[in-house]
Amino acid sequence: MVQDNDRQDASGPMIRFQKVKKSFGDVHVLRELDLDVATAERISIIGASGSGKTTLLRILMTLEEPNSGVIYVDGEPLWHKKVNGELVEADEKHLRKMRGKIGMVFQQFNLFPHMKVLRNVTEAPIHVLGTPRDKAEARAKELLDMVGLADKMDNYPSQLSGGQQQRVAIARALAMQPKVMLFDEITAALDPELVGEVLGVMRQLAHETQMTMLIVTHEMGFARDVSHRIVFLHEGQVLEEGPPEKIFTNPDHPRTREFLSRVLEH
Amino acid sequence: MLPPFDLLPTLVRGLRVTIGLTLAASTLALIVAVIAGVARTSKNPLISGIVGFYVELFRGTSVLVQMFWIFFVLPIPPFNISLSPFLAGVIALGLNVGAYGSEVVRGAIQAISRSQIEAGIALNFTPTQRMTRIILPQAMVRILPPFGNLLIELLKSTALVSLITLSDLTFQALTLRQTVGRTTEVFAVLLIMYFLLAYPLTLGVRWVEGRRVWA
Amino acid sequence: MVTFDWEFAWEILPQLLEAMVVTIEATVVGFAFAAVLGLLLALGRRSETWWISRPAGAIVEFVRSTPLLVQLFFLFYVLPRYGVRLPAFVVGVIGLGLHYGSYTSEVYRAGIDAIARGQWEAATALNFSQRHKWTKIILPQAIPPMLPALGNYLVAMFKETPLLAAITVVEMFQRAKIISSLTFRPLEPYTLVGVLFFVLSFPSALLIQRLEARFGTR
């Protein structure tokens, strides 16, 4: 049990990681990681593979449970529940309440293969949020239009290209109207010629919404264009962070420089 | 009527029993298979253990032995449960095929990748919604062809009830052989009738296998 | 209240074990027949000569679509009318072999189809004879991955040997029936037969699972 020292309020960060530890067996993926993300802030998380980027997102989406530390989302602890001022482990009910604030887009899209595109987008709003079907469908059509796929709503995911599937996955996550969106290497599984269309949708999204976004990516140009802040993760800790101009042109830490020179070479 | 059609009225009486038995036993098998298949993926070791015992017991012994046990052993003390031959047949075939079917269901559920469950969590579905809206519908498509094959096996196994005195198709044929003779004719017609029942099912299974819209 | 009589069970066990020898003999001989017949049927179905491939296909479809019990009755009652008088055990083994041959033929077919096209082309390019291609190139690759599926049918056939009781073969189940009707005690013989089947088939099934894991099929 952990003492809930500093109460979060509405003016506090949207997301706060406090000394979060996570290991898989002997492998320590996150080592007492601290990180704050402000409301409406867009951050890109970069770093070598194994630095803990994906794990950070998966813990936020409640797909992995941290070993220790506390995470706050929108002023409330994510993996804990307050009972008489003490933080105790969250139950399924609390986790479901918190998941309502967060949406995620996966590297492998993870669309439901047995549902047509439109139903992929409406299924959760109707059955989780209780939105009436006609409203949910109207909203889904708007979102599919936004990602340029209004004409594909009666197709099955397997009939779409990878880039199209990923754009549907973005619309599906947006349909839940989360406060925070997590993007986990969403172009990594795509053929090079399909990366552009997905990043295009992302740029548009960055311009038009005030959502808090955490983006894990290897597309450095894109990260530079859309992010307010770049976070460089190294061996499970934030080694360096700052505005894109600073990180990409004049990083403080030699390891950041080394990493960037390796990925920017090609 | 001209031979061999004069045999048909008697055989058709048995055919009705065979079809009724197939429908009743396959309904029982379907229900058992889904419940046992889902229960076996339970994280509770007591539930998965009990279901595992049932499945291995019925898969590990012979269906004819199970049928005789249910029909001849259950009526005596300490059980004192007397079942009609029809009911004994339904229960034996239903539980036996249900055990095989549950393995199909379990395998199909486990074949749904972890990432589909994660997408369900990310969209905030309840655990029950994840099972009924995401996992089972996808599993169903994998389940259909093997279930069709099990239905064919079940249909063929109904012939065994003739050995516990239920007057199904095979039983009527054995009676005809004793009353009118014409052994070759009787059994040839019998084989053809079973073929006409089972082969459309085989074709149906192949049709379903070739028709899945999504990969 | 009557419950399981251990003493009686112990008394009848030797008779059942003796009859089990017949059960195992029927399984082994029947499956050897099925394995060979299945291969012939599978190769027959692949033949480019239609009067070989069509009948082979028809036999497989027909035998798979009709009950083993009825096939056994057919062989048992009809063959003697045409002068073929065989012991019941032989009729039973032929029935088992024929029925399961139609199943194993599908296993062989799938296994042969799984061999990559390049292997056939390589064999042709090296100008091997037809016989050499099959016995040295295709079958040695195709058969090991088939073993788990063949094993499953072996166990399935073992569990269907009680059907031979219907044509008077005194195997394990028929022995239990006889004991039951002579003593009016069905509980012990039928339970013991169930246990004996389980004791043999369950470990075999586990063994096949390990084979499956090893060959990485399904």
Image (cartoon, grey):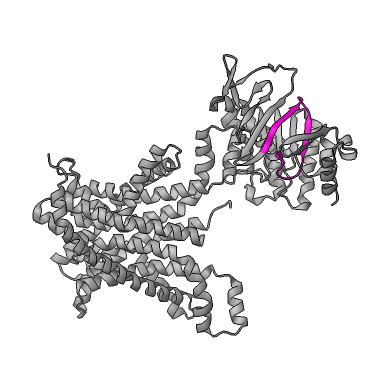
Numbered disc total: 0
Furthest-front residue in this view: A26
Residue at the image position 62 percent from the left and 35 percent from the top? B122
Using the image, determine if residue A76 lies above or below residue B119: above
Left or right of residue A219, residue B5 in this image: left
In screen coordinates, is A167 left or right of C87? right
The magenta region covers A29-52
Residue B3 appears in the figure: no
Q: Position of residue A139 (x, y in %)?
A: 68, 32
Question: Residue B183 magenta-drawn?
Answer: no
- Give the quarter of the image for residue A75: top right
Q: Quadrant of residue A52?
A: top right
Give me the residue at 40% from left, 41% from top. Answer: B48
Q: Name the foreground residue: C179 vs C7.
A: C7
Q: Identify the residue at the far top of this view.
A: A84
**Does residue A179 appear left or right of residue C174 in this picture?**
right
Of residue B212 and residue B1, the one placed in the foreground of this image is B212
B155 versus B80 height, above or below: below
Confirm whether the magenta stretch covers residue A49.
Answer: yes
Q: Position of residue B90 (x, y in %)?
A: 28, 48
**Residue C84 appears in the picture as rendered:** yes
Q: Position of residue C84 (x, y in %)?
A: 21, 79
Question: Is B2 or B177 nearer to us in this picture?
Answer: B177
| Residue B191 in picture, x, y percent from top left | 29, 66
Q: Is residue A59 left or right of residue A91?
A: right
User: In the displayed structure, would residue A235 be above or below residue A41?
Assistant: below
Q: Quarter holding the N terminus of chain C?
A: top left
